[in-house]
Structures are given as C-alpha cells and as structure tokens.
Image (spheres, rainbow, N blue to C red):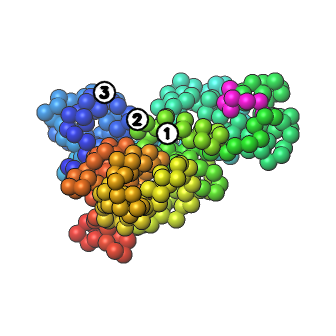
Amino acid sequence: MRMESLPAHGEMMAAFQSRNATYDGVFFTGVRTTGIFCRPICPARKPKPQHVEFFATARDALYSGYRPCRRCRPMEPAGSPPDWLQALLADLDEDPSRRWRDHDLRQRGLHPDRVRRWFQRHHGMTFHAYCRSRRLGLALGKIREGVGVSTTAYQHGYESLSGFNEAFRQLVGATPSASGTGIVLQVTRVLTPLGPMIAGGTEDSLYFFEFSDRRRLEKQLEGLRRRLDCVLVPGDNGVLSRVEREIGEYFAGDLRRFSVPLEAPGTEFQQTVWDALQEIPFGETRSYADIARVIGRPSAVRAVARANGDNRMAIFIPCHRVVGSDGRLTGYGGGLWRKQHLLDLESRVSPGGLFSQDEA
C-alpha cells in the first residue's frame, strides 16, 4: 500500500462519514471491529473513527485481511451500474430514440425514484433528462447530415414538430433549422482506479478527458462550448470506446503511449505547451521552467503553468508529469494525491510496458 496515493486522512474521514459520492473509487475503508471493508458511500451505520483505516485499493484491503462488504460491493468498479439497472441501460443503448415513461420502468419492476437517484448521482441529470439529451443529440447529428427537421423529429420519438423545436431550443439555444453548424460532442463516464472521469469526443477525436469532481470542470466545458460552438450530449462512439480501453490498459500497466486521436482547441501558446507535455517520456518529469525552455520562452514560466492548468485532457496530455523546480508536486486539477498516484504508477512500469516483478 502506498499512502501517498491517498488523500489526507482528515479529508477521507470527512468523506466517509458524509458518504460523499465523489470519493467512490478514490479510497476504501476497513472497519477493524467487523473485519469488513467498504466504499465511502456504504449505507451501513458508520463506525467510530478510531476503528477505521483507509486503503488505496481493494487489493490492499484484501491483503490486510478484510473481506468485502455485501451491501456496497467494493470489489466492483466505482460507479459501475448495478445489476438491477443493466437491462434498462442495454435497451437504452439499443434504441436511444425510444421515449421512456415511469409506467415503462414499473413494468420492468424498477421504481422510477430509484432510477432517478442513480442517474442524478452518476450523470448529474434524471433518467428522463438523460434520455431526452441522447435523443436530441442523435437528432442534431441527423440534421447536420442534411436530414429534414420534420423527418428527424418523428424518427426520434417526437409526436409533434412544435414539441421537438422547443426541446431542441432548450438544449442547443437555437431552432433545429438554425443549428446546421458546430460540433456534436458525445459525453460518457469512464471508470478508473482514481474515480470516474468524463470523456467527450466525436467519432474522429477526443476533445476532453477530466476527473468528474474537478472544481473547474463546468467552466472548462463552457469554454469549450463557446470556442467550438458545440453541443454536449450523453452518448458513446468509437473514439470514446477506444478511450475506455486504452485508459484501462494504462492503469493496468500494459500501455505506455496512447493512440487515441486528440483535438485540443486553445490559443497558439497553449497548444505549444500541450505539445511539449506530450513529449515528456513516460515515467519521467519536467519542471515548468524546463517546458518554458523547450518551447523557446524561458521567461514564460508562469504562463506555462497557466497553460498546464488549462489542459482539458488529463492523462492523455500528461500535465501530471510537470513538477516544481525543486521536484515537489505542484497544483493539479484532480488533486495532488492523484498526481502522485499517476507518477507512482508510471515509475513502477517496466520499459516493456508491464509492472516490474516486485510489483506483480
């Protein structure tokens, strides 16, 4: 177990006692009096603080003699859809244009409030709002391919053109006929050992990849919307599936260099800095001053630091590999403990791309 990969003890205790869902997958809690380890969000009665210890991974808790809790099931990836929801999600993926009602959920034996709470927690919107956003995103794509507005409305489950126009205006800020430009970015959650992350991209490129609890996330996405005149809608595509696969391989120690195509809109200076970040070798670090020298702007250290912080592509554009001139960790949008975890991970991976034998 590597304690430096964990948040501060007080921070974890506060998150555990308040059942803070943003820490799900960030740490695990072992209860000495019961011999059970749990997620931070476990609904069971909370033990006294002196009976609690924290672990960075479920494996660490198991090796310390704890058994997994049957209520919060900590052996499953953080944020994974529960078994009772799997069939509904599969049908939603099969036919995203379907209009779902509470009656449809009850016929499946699902309580609408339970479904709503899960979507609110993990997607920031209700189930019905999620479905509407997916339908509208698909409709927008069809309109920009040249399909007529009326045809698109009825193909995507709308009973009237006026209803479609109003729903579309609320999402996009314009009528369907006036939205023929811009980009549709499909957005999905990607589960990682450091907690859920948000990925957004088209069929061609990844445009952002960030920790779901980053404080500046909403501002970053709003800036991206303005710069690209884009619309963000829930969904999936080939690039996002590739992101999920490669990020899983990275955390498993099987991948040292990503092949996902990236699109990082920004100023010329920002893009120059982000290009330099991608040249930092896996397992190594550079200082802000090093980056400033590499790009030919040795006096622009602070500007380099700002550009580093403006990076929307966590891990893929490895801003976590930039440290202070004295080697200490400096600011990181996902939290310094995550930065340390990523650096620890990369330092333990052998040149062949797998964890060294002493870490196996």
Q: Secondary structure at mark 2?
A: loop
Q: At numbered mark 1, what does the secondary structure look like: helix, strand or loop?
A: helix
Judge depth for marks 1 and 2 and give the one in front: 1
Residue at the location (25% across, 42% down)? 7
Q: Which residue is mark 2?
A: 215
| Residues drawn in magenta | 170-176
The amino acid pointed to by label 1 is Gln
- Mark 3–mark 1 Cα distance, whole angstroms, equals 28 Å
Which residue is depicted at the point 25% across and 46% down? 6
Q: Quadrant of residue 86?
A: top right
The circle drawn on residue 18 is 3
Quadrant occupied by the N terminus: bottom left
Q: Quadrant of the C terminus?
A: bottom left
In this rendering, which labeled residue sits more in front, label 2 or label 3?
2
What separation in Å lies between label 2 and label 3 (alpha carbons)?
Answer: 19 Å
Label 1: few (<14), some (14–19) or many (≥20) C-alpha neighbours in 10 Å: some
Q: Residue at x 55, y 29 (%)?
A: 125
Q: Are marks 2 and 3 in contact (CB under 8 Å)?
A: no
In the image, 21 versus 350, the foreground residue is 350
Q: Nearer the viewer, mark 3 or mark 1?
A: 1
Residue at numbered disc 1: 220
Horizontal side, residue 358 vs residue 322: left or right = left
